[in-house]
Amino acid sequence: MKRLMLSCVMAAALAAAGCGSRSADVDAAGAATAAAETGGSAKGDFGPPQGEPIHAVLTSPPHVPPPVGRDHPAKVIVELTVIEKEMPISEGVSYTFWTFGGTVPGSFIRVRQGDTVEFHLRNDPTSKMPHNIDLHGVTGPGGGAASSFTAPGHESQFTFKALNEGLYVYHCATAPVGMHVGNGMYGLILIEPPGGLAKVDHEYYVMQGDFYTTGKYREKGLQPFDMEKAIDEKPTYVLFNGAEGALTGDKALAAKTGETIRLFVGNGGPNLVSSFHVIGEIFDRVRYEGGTREQENVQTTLIPAGGAVMVEFHTEVPGSYVLVDHSIFRAFNKGALAILKVDGTENKSIYSGKEVDSVYLGDRAEPNLKPVAVATKAAAAGALTVEDQVKAGQVLFTGTCSVCHQANGEGLPGVFPPLAKSDLIAADAKRAVGILLHGLSGKITVNGKEYNSVMPPMTQLNDDEVANILTYVLNSWGNPGGRITVDDVAKARAQPAPTATAAH
Amino acid sequence: MRRPPALSMSIACAVLGVASTVYAADYVSLAGGTFTSVLPADGKAGDATVAPFRLRATPVTNAEFLAFVRAHPQWRRDHSPAVFAESRYLSSWSAPDAPGPAASSEQPVTWVSWFAAQAFCENERARLPTWYEWEFAAAADATRTDARADPAWRERILTWYARPSTAALASVGGEANVYGARDLHGLVWEWVDDFNALLVSADNREQGDPDMLRFCGAGALTLQQRENYAVLMRVAMLSSLKAADATANLGFRCAKPGLIEDAP
């Protein structure tokens, strides 16, 4: 509300300044935008540095240095060391990372707009490679790269004035750039606006990167960099802060309910663009692309490779919030997961937690699951009859199977094979157990017709349910009858999945 | 402009001495020829021409360098002037005239400056190889004179890059390539005679910015085989150095022009 009023005042002021009829047409939002123009680098020079030189506080991820808290430009000395080192990338898997400051991502640097930054880049004597640094927050050719090209065991120095506020990626730009970046050589530098950023309760530093190893995902041992996969842009790992588990378990980010969190999130690449999302939260404010403007109420924000973003949100409900790249296979199959653990008292008025846990069978379902309950009770008492199984199986079949195989078991011609009068079932009723448990794909022939599609494994069904469904099928639609027991299912479940050829 | 990789190297004459002609200090002979270097000879796309030459079969070892230093005490680390060798010259040795337990006799000598390497080679009536000579020899694998189009060749090199360098160096004497030269890949970087001309050669007036390689990979655009990162990284490493510099992973081997030893 306060913001809105301010905007209105500004609009009025602009109109009063009088640029003819055009300014009178400017709406409140437009006027606010115009008034907030930063002027970019042309207005970012606040004069020579004042006071004694300051040594920048550098932090390892996920920590962020404290706010600058200065009202004048200063000379800030940054000392960063490149270290090539073997570190875990996943459980039992290690990788030779090339790092700025010994971590992936590299140390977080925080300065104020207008500061004169004296940058010292050191390359550790144990390094095999020469390295340099290109800071996206630098105005000048190569972003410092040419001036910081450093052989192993050497130190380079260059100085720049931080003219533009914002959150910027830095990275190594030594050829081959892709390999240096792919090995973890990136980090973030925050150039605070002169007035600083709004105070929050927690600031954290998270950076995504994609990694290319010759071995498969989670293949054990020291894994070398795979140039072919990198060129093909097919990463083995997509990670937050350089390792699977870097921000989970004991290392999860922490906060309490009722707090405001600011995440500085970068994307080092080298290849992928991140669809950054926090499961269970909505970003109240996003400084998209790490720039000056804000978007509000955002679910997922794009972070380009070589880009960054500042997101803020307020915590209301305790629990674990999962940071992901919402290109979601990356999260669950390549490692792009981190956790923010929020402690505090429940707030049921905002989020109830689970209130009801019931089976939902969809609109084809019979409303009454009583036969299932009866069968379960009978089984527990050791008095389960075929009759009980058929009745329970019918209800379960309606909820699970009838969508494809139809309520009458006829299937759909050419797509879903029939279960009614099925020669396949008649030939070997027990085989149906394996099909339910492991699924079935590829060509099969049923009642003289060929089908070639995919049935997923029904892993959600327990042994009772599988036994009941199949007993129902065996005793319906002209099938030969008989019974599948829980033991049959348990035995089949213990067997390995049949090979594709076994299904023919 | 770029040729298909399989045709990228045409050896002008038959390879001599594939069976490794061995000299006193164990040199192997290479017939030379024209070939496509990652650094085009004319700054654009020209092939490089390599005259017949001989190359040390292995990098110079600590034992060999120790013998040199004892015979030429001006190259001891406590005697050599700083303009020829930086303060860390031979710093891996326990004493100025003794490698000590940390630097075994059969390991390649490292922490040597270009000047020191050149002096060593002169002492055995040789010189450092040129970049083209080194690259020509290193294009081979065990059975082919030019294996560069084979992804396996490249992968082997990249695997070395991916190994951390904190472990002790292996001894010289790895698998021989088709010429009988060993350890061109997978052990140490090696000085070349013209290391500081790889970006700014006499012929590169049309190449533009001499600092290209140092910017965001722009330098890669001038290289003929852009996908050949493995070789490019060696160029990048060498071009980061000055002649008095020394590093933990940088050694050298010597070369001699021609295929036959001149009369003394």
Image (spheres, rainbow, N blue to C red):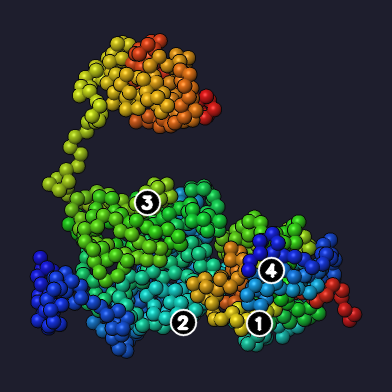
Q: Which callout, 3 or 4, points to the residue nearer the camera? A: 4
Q: Quadrant of residue B40?
A: bottom right
Q: Which callout, 2 or 1, points to the residue nearer the camera? A: 1
> For the residues tagged 1 and 3, is the chain the same?
no
**C-alpha span from label 3 to label 4:** 42 Å
Whether residue A131 sits left or right of residue B183 in the image: it is left
Q: Secondary structure at mark 2?
A: strand
The vertical placement of A59 against A195, above or below, is: above
Image coords of residue A500 (percent x, y): 52, 30
At 27% from the left edge and 71% from the top edge, which residue is drawn?
A: A292
Image coords of residue A48 (percent x, y): 32, 89
Pointer 1 residue? B203
- The answer to which of marks 4 and 1 sits earlier in the sequence is 4
What amino acid does circle 4 point to?
Answer: Thr
- The answer to which of marks 2 and 3 sits earlier in the sequence is 2
Q: Secondary structure at mark 3?
A: loop
**C-alpha span from label 2 to label 3:** 40 Å
Pointer 4 residue? B36
Pointer 3 residue? A327
> For the residues tagged 4 and 1, is the chain the same?
yes
- The chain under label 2 reads A
Image coords of residue A370 (percent x, y): 21, 19
Pointer 2 residue? A157
**C-alpha span from label 2 to label 1:** 31 Å
The vertical placement of A76 against A256, above or below, is: below
- The chain under label 1 reads B
What amino acid does circle 3 point to?
Answer: Ser
